[in-house]
Image: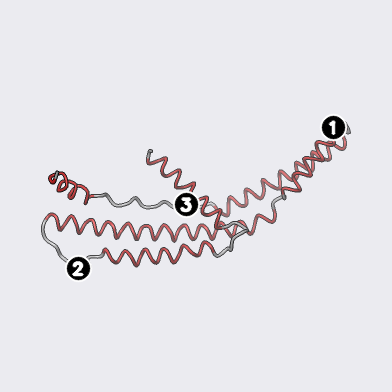
Amino acid sequence: MSRMRHLQLGSWLILMVLLAACSKDKAIDEPAKLTPFAATLRAQSQNYSLNGVDWEGTGAEAAGQALRQHQGWLNGLANFYDSVSAQAAQLAEAHDRWAPQHPTVQEIEQAEQEREEARASGDRVRWKVAQDRYHQLFMKSEEVREGYKKDVAGVAAQTPPPPPASWRRVFGKCSSHAS
């Protein structure tokens, strides 16, 4: 699978998580649960800090570089979760603001039924009134969707790529000699 496809799937997954977090069936505090996870990642990244340790030799330098890359990756993930948390909160606020203003499914179904009944009756005035009502609901929906879109417009959060598996190059050579 291509890197672009992975990014697309990741973006869709993030969108689904955000929508689930903002669902009316769930508490709005769901986005806040990502923030402690970001703090946990930052704390875990300290396990990979060399804290002034100075190693010598090619292997030691490669190991030190791998540790620093892993620490950087964990901090990058923490930043990602902070961003996702902020975006989820923004999405929840937009949902709370705009959802009540959107026509309900019942209103749309009723307008569609009235339009169909007017068409079937052959009454052109009744059909025009029903068509106008349906159009008003459609325009209100578009207005709400545009407002919602403006409120949630932002930069898509992207996970940092994992560090290169340089240890595989070093230890892979060792294991190939063992066979």
Q: Nearer the viewer, residue 135 or 24?
A: 24
- Residue 178 percent coordinates (x, y): 13, 46
Q: Separation of disc 3 and disc 2 at Cα? A: 36 Å
Q: Earlier in the sequence, mark 2 or mark 1?
A: 2
Image depth: mark 2 or mark 1 in front:
1
Residue shown at 58%/63% (left/top)?
28
Q: Are marks 1 and 3 in contact (CB under 8 Å)?
A: no
Q: Earlier in the sequence, mark 1 or mark 3?
A: 1
Q: Is residue 146 left or right of residue 139?
A: left
Residue type, numbered disc 1: Ala
Q: Separation of disc 1 and disc 3 at Cα? A: 49 Å
Residue shown at 53%/51% (left/top)?
153
**Would you name the residue on which mark 1 appears?**
120
Residue type, numbered disc 3: Val
Residue shown at 56%/53% (left/top)?
19
Q: Nearer the viewer, residue 116 or 93?
A: 116
Residue type, numbered disc 2: Gly
Give the secondary structure at mark 3. Answer: loop
**Would you name the residue on which mark 3 appears?**
155
- Residue 177 percent coordinates (x, y): 12, 45
- Residue 86 percent coordinates (x, y): 49, 60
Q: Considering the image in quadrants, where does the N terminus appear?
A: top left
How crowded is the residue under tag 3: few (<14 C-alpha within 10 Å), some, or many (20+)?
Answer: few
Q: Is residue 148 left or right of residue 123?
A: left
Image depth: mark 3 or mark 2 in front:
2
How crowded is the residue under tag 1: few (<14 C-alpha within 10 Å), some, or many (20+)?
Answer: few
Q: Earlier in the sequence, mark 3 or mark 2?
A: 2
Q: Please determine whether, in this image, residue 27 is positioned above or below residue 126.
A: below
**Would you name the residue on which mark 2 appears?**
52
The image's mark for residue 84 is: none
Q: Considering the image in quadrants, where does the C terminus appear?
A: top left
Q: Nearer the viewer, residue 155 or 116?
A: 116
